[in-house]
Amino acid sequence: MSHFSQVQTVIRDQALLGEALRQLQFNFQSGEEMTINGYQGNTEQGVVVIKTGCRYDIGFQRQADGSFAVCADWWGIEFNTPIRQETFLQSLNRTYAHLAVKRQVLEQGLIIEQERILPNGEIELVVCERY
């Protein structure tokens, strides 16, 4: 019996996903059909796979709508590593969104004057137009 679960995300850009994972200091591999390892040798396929340091992986599967779903055997990961599903997904979504906003600001020709993390964890960007 497979213990894999999928969690839908709003992540669509694989390059930004990779950058977010790098900033969060996760070792990962990407490719067309990467193996995601789970309980009792069960596997799934994904395009990005994080090696967690145990025999269970966290994978990202491209969905029909272009977004990614996170696929993992969270029981095995949480039992064998300090990685927790909820905090992992929160950190990933926050980092990805931050990178996406910064990229959009720069693509619009704006300058980021200031960037700071507020006490509640939110990130504040102060931007201005180029002179």
Image (cartoon, rainbow, N blue to C red):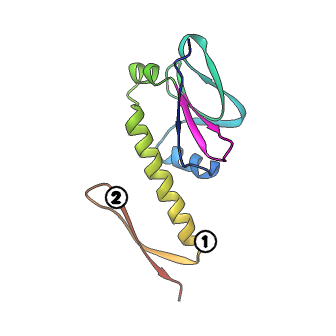
Q: Nearer the viewer, residue 34 or 73?
A: 73
Q: Main secondary structure of the magenta part?
A: strand
Q: Position of residue 68 (x, y in %)?
A: 60, 42
Furthest-left residue in this view: 119
Secondary structure, mark 2, is loop
Q: Give the image quarter of residue 71.
A: top right
| 63 magenta-colored | yes
User: Mark 2 — residue?
Assistant: 122
Furthest-bottom residue in this view: 131
Relative vertical location of residue 40 with respect to residue 4 in this rendering, above or below:
above
Residue drawn at (38%, 38%) of the image: 87
Please state the extent of the stretch shown in magenta in the rendering: 58-72
Relative vertical location of residue 10 with respect to residue 77 in this rendering, above or below:
below
| Real-space Cα separation, disc 2 to disc 1, in angstroms | 22 Å
Q: Position of residue 121 (x, y in %)?
A: 31, 54
Q: Nearer the viewer, residue 58 or 131?
A: 58
Q: Position of residue 114 (x, y in %)?
A: 39, 72
User: Mark 1 — residue?
Assistant: 107
Furthest-right residue in this view: 32
Q: Residues within 10 Å of mark 2 (few under 14, many from 20)?
A: few
Amino acid type, label 1: Glu
Q: Residues within 10 Å of mark 1 (few under 14, many from 20)?
A: few
Q: Give the image quarter of residue 83.
A: top left
